[in-house]
Amino acid sequence: MEESLSFLNAIRKEFACGSVDVKTYSPLTLAFVGDCVYDLIVRTLVVERANAAPNTLHKKKSQVVKAQSQAKQADALFEELTQQEQAVYKRGRNAHSHTSAKNASIADYRKATGLEALYGFLYLSDQTERLLYLVKRSFELTQTDL
């Protein structure tokens, strides 16, 4: 019987990726990946809960992934993070980005970047269970309804 691989490890195996210590990635690189991972989780939940027109799905998803929502989630989760997770979040939050959100304050944008960096770190270090727990917990703490 073939052993089941995580999505990440399946990608690494299929495309013959070398191993890199995730701690060496810049916080903005982690946020780049975390943004996509978080978006995929939210899109999956939105689609699983309602078979609707793409525009309707997009609007629902956008309310959850916008910087203001992520900033609230980051604030709500912070005390539940391990020391290592807090350090990754802070590195992402404090990273100097040359871009900003169109409709968010700088503070919210930075908190969102920190949260995305954390999610990218957890994904790239193959901590899927912890990643999903934190996303779910952030929704519970902020009463986010999908």
Image (cartoon, rainbow, N blue to C red):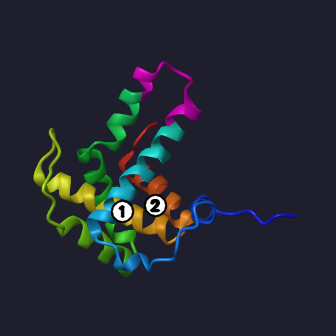
Q: Position of residue 43 (x, y in %)?
A: 48, 38
Query: Is 18 on the left or on the right of 69, as rendered?
Result: right
Which label's residue is closer to the chain start, 2 or 1?
Answer: 1
Viewer-closest of 54 and 21: 21
- Which of the labelled discs sits on residue 134, or is there none? 2
Residue 65 found in image quarter: top left
Query: Is 10 on the left or on the right of 85, as rendered?
Result: right
Q: Position of residue 72 (x, y in %)?
A: 27, 52
Start-end of magenta stretch = 46-57
Q: Amino acid at mark 2?
A: Leu
Q: Secondary structure at mark 2?
A: helix
Q: Position of residue 86 (x, y in %)?
A: 32, 74
* Contact? badges 2 and 1 (CB < 8 Å): yes
Q: Residue furthest front?
A: 16
* Residue highlighted by disc 1: 77
Viewer-closest of 11 and 45: 11
